[in-house]
Amino acid sequence: MPATPMIDQWSIRPTWLEIDCQGVVSNYNRAKERVGSGVAVFPVVKADAYGLGAVPISRALKAAGAPGLCVGLVEEGATLRKAGIDGPMVLFAGLTPGSEESILDHDLTPFLYDLVQARSLSRFAQSRQRRVGCYVKVDTGMGRIGFPAPELARAVAVIQALPGLRLLGIVSHLAWGDEEPSATVSAGQISQMQTLLAQPEIERISKAHHSLANSAGILYHSRSHLDWVRPGIMLYGASPAHPRRHAQEEGLVAVVRWLSRIIQVRTVEAGTPLGYGHSHICRKKTIIAQIPVGYGDGYNRLLSNRGAVLIHGKRASVLGRVCMDLTSIDITEIPEARTGSLVTLLGADRTDFIGIEQMAGWMQTIPYEVICNLGKRLARRYL
Ligand SMILES: *Cc1c(COP(=O)(O)O)cnc(C)c1O
């Protein structure tokens, strides 16, 4: 396996992604600037680095000095370890029953959020004569996993007494991934976290390494930075507060281009119905192009009659329903377009640009989902 996977066997089809690892590093440096030198930045590469490719992106981030990484699942951590990525690797929610052995084997650092789980990891580590570093997760308002705040001090005392575990610090998660209008929820979570950390049981943790901030915390709440932060979406070129704020305003660069080529051009007469369900009827004589990409690649069906692509720097609208492997676009106003012309589904073409934020807007979802759904069959080229 080459260190950086290049175009793979699917490259016969002219549809591919270009992922700019140095762009991810530039966004990582932006996170570092925001938190300052005393705070460690552990990039979040869960879900295959939000669909963009955890192995090459993690390599680039480690080469740029990232002190640790965060994954969602044991399997994701195992993949990175097998690719030779070393150093601290934090595991968010993957400590499920039966995963203890793999956590030890791959040297992952889990978030603990209940005592049954902590005891079973402790027993396993002890049987192997190992000590596993771990963080204790507390719920300060997300209402998801974590010890309830009033139970934190007791849980910490129990966990610290368990053999085979080494408690590194306390972690929590912000409920507003967003720059919330009033900022009161996040402010409340931050204050609650500070109160919890000031409890004697917790102050006693030596060399404590506490964390609360995701991208939103990094960008909008400096009091949430604590000892280490966990940026995800900002690394991949979107504002966590989209649609209220945009990547450019946060100083973030786009890291993914999605490209294809026209495979057929046809002229159809006024009144011609197009595609499944005839959801578009041409009002006038129209030149349509087919591009070999569809919802089987993560080009969401919600982009039917809504999305647009760039050809020769000009916008061409999606006509009719996006199919599994094909999408029709209107090139009536782009007479220079031909079979073989380059099509930009995401990224810049001359002076125009379609970003993951804009595509998310067309689909009425968040940029996170746009990139997480980029299909496995798309060839990926790492720059
Ligand atoms: C996904 C995740 C993050 C990163 O969130 P972004 O909004 O993408 O920055 C941080 N912490 C935890 C626990 C997460 O699950």
Image: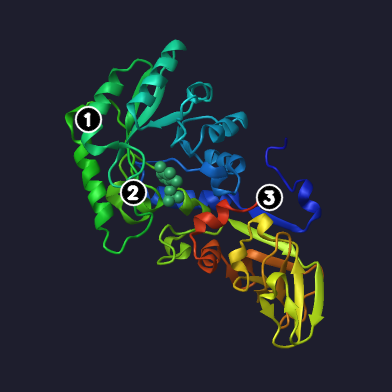
| In the displayed structure image, the side of residue 290 where residue 26 appears, left or right | left
Local packing at callout 1 (Cα closer than 10 Å; few below 14, some 14-19, many 20+) is some
Q: CA distance from mark 2 to mark 1?
A: 20 Å
Residue 173 numbered tag:
none
Viewport quadrant of the N terminus:
top right
What amino acid is at disc 2? Answer: Leu
The residue at which mark 2 appears reads as: 174
Per the image, label 2 sits on a secondary structure element best described as loop
Per the image, label 3 sits on a secondary structure element best described as strand
Local packing at callout 3 (Cα closer than 10 Å; few below 14, some 14-19, many 20+) is many
| In the displayed structure image, the side of residue 288 where residue 300 appears, left or right | left
The residue at which mark 3 appears reads as: 380
| In the displayed structure image, the side of residue 117 where residue 372 appears, left or right | right
Q: Quadrant of residue 120?
A: top left
Q: Quadrant of residue 292?
A: bottom right
Q: Nearer the viewer, residue 296 or 375?
A: 296
Height in image: 12 above or below 93?
below
Q: Which mark is first along the chain, 3 or 2?
A: 2
The residue at which mark 1 appears reads as: 153
What amino acid is at disc 3? Answer: Arg
Per the image, label 1 sits on a secondary structure element best described as helix
Local packing at callout 2 (Cα closer than 10 Å; few below 14, some 14-19, many 20+) is many
Q: Nearer the viewer, mark 3 or mark 1?
A: 1
Residue at 24% over, 57% down = 184
